[in-house]
Image: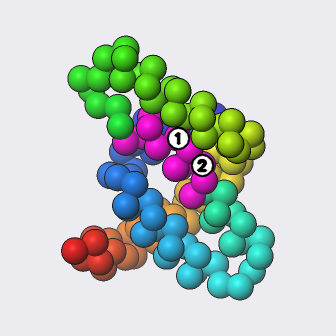
Amino acid sequence: MPSICRYCLFFSDRGEVKVLSDLAMISAGDTPMELDKVACFNSAVMGFAPFLFDLKKTSGLDDVLRALKSVQEHRDRDPELPEKWVGDFAFCLPGIEGLQDDSKPNYRDSDM
């Protein structure tokens, strides 16, 4: 499984994931396979969001258990969540990183 820490550093918050997913959808065009990959990417990141965004260096065991419970609830709703994380998320990340680099000045302004 790809390192969660790598993605903690890559995304600053859920809003950034949403904007980058929207940009990736636009870049994917009308190709169903590419659109599915972006959708899986978004599902994977949001499914693991409690680990990516909610835990801080000062988080204690209760915080970790809360995050774990939330991820388990996402997995219960989407049993393929681990496969999405390993497969489509890892596959899409280089393209998303490129979108982030290309659009950084623009998408940060769009949140305002």
Task: Say which of 72 and 9 sits in front.
Answer: 72
The extreme top residue here reads: 61
Which residue lies under the disc numbered 2? Answer: 44
Give whichever of 85, 96 is nearer the camera: 85
Specify start and end residues of the magenta stretch as a single range: 42-53
- Quarter the C terminus occupies: bottom left
Q: Is residue 82 above or below residue 34?
A: above
Q: Residue at x 72, y 66 (%)?
A: 36
Q: Give the residue displayed 55% in from the left and 73% down from the top.
A: 24
Q: Is residue 28 magenta?
A: no
Q: Picture quarter containing residue 107?
A: bottom left
Name the spot of residue 93 as percent of width and height, x first: 55, 57
At mark 1, the secondary structure is loop
Q: Where is residue 104 shown, x and y percent of the image?
A: 32, 71
Which residue is drawn at the image coordinates 29% and 23% (left, top)? 59
Q: Where residue 106 appears, x then y in whole percent?
A: 30, 79
Q: Are marks 1 and 2 in contact (CB under 8 Å)?
A: yes
Residue type indicated by callout 2 = Ala
Q: Return the mark for residue 60.
A: none
The residue labelled by disc 1 is 48
Please indicate, yes or no, whether residue 21 appears anywhere in the rendered image.
yes
